[in-house]
Amino acid sequence: MFVCILLYLVSQAGKIHSRLNLKLLLQFPLIPTIVVGQNLDPYEITYCYKMNDELILLDCWASSYGMRVKIALAEKGLEYECREENFQEKSHLLLKSNPIHKTIPVLVHNGNPICESLNIVRYIDEFWPHKSPLLPSDPYKRSQNLFWADYIDKKIYSIGKRVWRGKGDEDQEIAKREFIECLKKLEDELGNKPYFGGENVGFVDVALVPFTSWFYTYEARGNFSIEAECPKLVSWANRCIRDNESVAKALPHPRKIYDFALNLLRPAQRQDELGHCPGHHII
Ligand SMILES: N[C@@H](CCC(=O)N[C@@H](CS)C(=O)NCC(=O)O)C(=O)O
């Protein structure tokens, strides 16, 4: 009884605006309903609290991995601070948060760092399950989503890099063929669904769609057309951008990526002038 009265006074004083009050209330799941009012259930309060958590994203704007995290955060309607890293001089926070790989993206949630893009997307999905579920709850479907996301991780970046960095030699030709082969496999997996996730953007869509902002660069550098080979996949990419603000906002313009890639191909001296995201580490 005493606790109830105390919490009532505290909550009235701060009108549930203070994070401290929410934390206190969440210690006693039944009390919010009794004390604060009939219309507020503990879940609502929990999410209201979780939506106000501190989120810092360590990023580089052209990174497909970083884009994944931005899409997931936007899907969940979360506010965050985005900090652009300079790879020549990585921030103390990045080195402290990801001492193993020292790579972006890193999401720092209330001071706790989470590394590796797919791991971060999964964390976001599990911590904020209230809207836009990305991974299915069914264990089998979930395992299939994780399989395809892993496939994308193992293939698209490394083969794509051989395409856009290629010098018109045999390896570039081989890489182009391998790249199209992978995309065709993904196109088969998509089938006639609007999204890999079914009717909405899901985990595999989030894993793959950022790489489509690099399609123009692959095509221009490799002198081939992805659309001619994989028209359904290109329609899917356009649909993702057209119908999902989360995707549209996270993906830079393909021409901007292309200019960025060209700068990376220039000699080291030019890259020094660039400052941000330089060198051979990226994309
Ligand atoms: N597997 C990692 C890849 C992350 C990654 O390669 N990040 C690059 C940028 S795209 C990076 O931080 N490069 C800086 C470096 O290697 O020093 C993930 O999914 O997050």
Image (spheres, grey):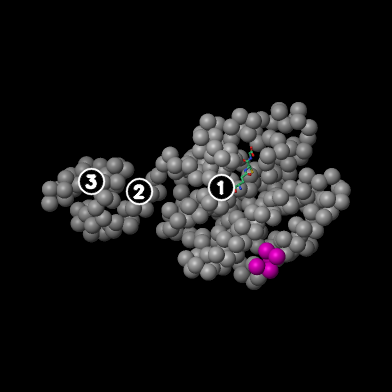
Residue 220 visible: no
Residue at 48% of width from left, 52% of height from top? 123
Label 2, label 3: how far apart the Cα atoms are = 14 Å
Ligand 1: which quarter? top right
Judge whether 148 appears above or below 6 on screen: below
The local secondary structure at tag 2 comes to helix
Residue at 50% of width from left, 67% of height from top? 139
The residue most toward the front is 100
Residue at 55% of width from left, 31% of height from top? 91
Judge whether 9 appears above or below 241 on screen: above
Q: Nearer the viewer, mark 1 or mark 3?
A: 1
The residue most toward the left is 1
Q: Earlier in the sequence, mark 2 or mark 1?
A: 2
Does any atom of ligand 1 lie closer than 8 Å to the CB of label 1?
yes
The local secondary structure at tag 1 comes to loop
Label 2, label 1: how far apart the Cα atoms are = 25 Å
Residue 107 at x, y percent in the picture: 50, 43
The total of numbered circles placed on residues is: 3
Residue 98 at x, y percent in the picture: 54, 39
Amino acid type indicated by mark 3: Ser
Residue 64 among magenta residues:
no
The magenta-colored residue range is: 185-189
* Mark 2 lies on residue: 49
Q: Nearer the viewer, mark 2 or mark 1?
A: 1
* Mark 1 lies on residue: 116
Residue 86 at x, y percent in the picture: 61, 33
* Mark 3 lies on residue: 11
